[in-house]
Amino acid sequence: MARLVALAAGDPVTRGLAGAIFAALGFVILAFAGADLVVFLFSQTPDDLVAVRGFRDVIGLDRDGSFGETVCFTVEFFGAAMFLAAYARHRGRLLFVLGVVMVFILADDSLQYHERFGAFLVRSFDLGALPFVRAQDSGEILAWALAGAIFVLLLVWSLGRRRAGDGGILLAVFWAFALLVGGGIGLDMLCIALPEEAEFLRGVIMILEEAGEFFGVGALAATALAVQRHGETYFTECAQGALRA
């Protein structure tokens, strides 16, 4: 992983594109958080601070079709394209699996897979609610678990032809997925479990949840970009190091 990071850091194009990705995601998070805080602190009625409310809604971390959602979709599409392009160039099974996973992440966000399939599971199997969450949330957790099980099977398949360097890529995506899952599932469930009276805390957790998802996706896209641009050097050096060892 360290060698891949070093290669990316030494390339102005990779460094610039990765910086642009995180700058765009950071702007969305900070802009929404700032507008939401202003409304919370200084608004007394729904008619106050109309311009600030409108700006917050345009950014809209929790709104379909918002600017924030469009930025996230763009980064997810870019990450999927880079992983699949890296697979086409370097032919590593792991790269193919990661490309498929990025396509799934994009499809999940845009088509609401876990919400819709979770609701289907609740209706079909009469699922009850887990502690502190609704039945719908139980269905969504199960939908994520099923998707995760498929991903694990694909990962095991990819490791059947593991190549020198795959471990570094796996480490990079592990931390990215930790942010993604921690935000999208962990903090989301915590936010749902909080009482409605804890409005400010719920708002803070919602922003942290979206930040985890956004920066997790950004880290995946940056890793995909680095592998696509520097995979030949990276895999060659890793193979030579393995031979020397």
Image (tube, rainbow, N blue to C red):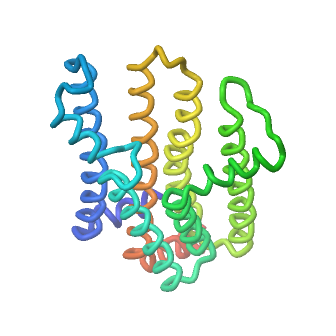
Residue beneath the point at 71% across and 67% down: 154
Considering every residue shown, the one lying at the far right of the view is: 125
Considering every residue shown, the one lying at the far top of the view is: 197
Residue beneath the point at 22% across and 68% down: 12
Residue beneath the point at 70% across and 75% down: 161
Count the labels in the image. 0
Q: Residue 107, position in %: x, y? A: 54, 64
Q: Is residue 71 left or right of residue 206?
A: left
| Nearer to me, 106 or 50 | 50
| Nearer to me, 127 or 9 | 127
Identify whether 89 is placed above or below 190: below
Picture quadrant where residue 15 is located: bottom left
Asked if residue 182 shows in the view, the reply is yes
Q: Quadrant of the C terminus?
A: bottom right
Identify whether 129 is placed above or below 121: above
Q: Residue 71, position in %: x, y? A: 33, 57
Q: Residue 59, position in %: x, y? A: 28, 46
Identify whether 72 is placed above or below 51: below
Asked if residue 168 shows in the view, the reply is no
Q: Residue 181, position in %: x, y? A: 56, 44
Residue beneath the point at 36% across and 64% down: 74
Identify whether 78 is placed above or below 20: below
Picture quadrant where residue 2 is located: bottom left
| Nearer to me, 73 or 225 | 73
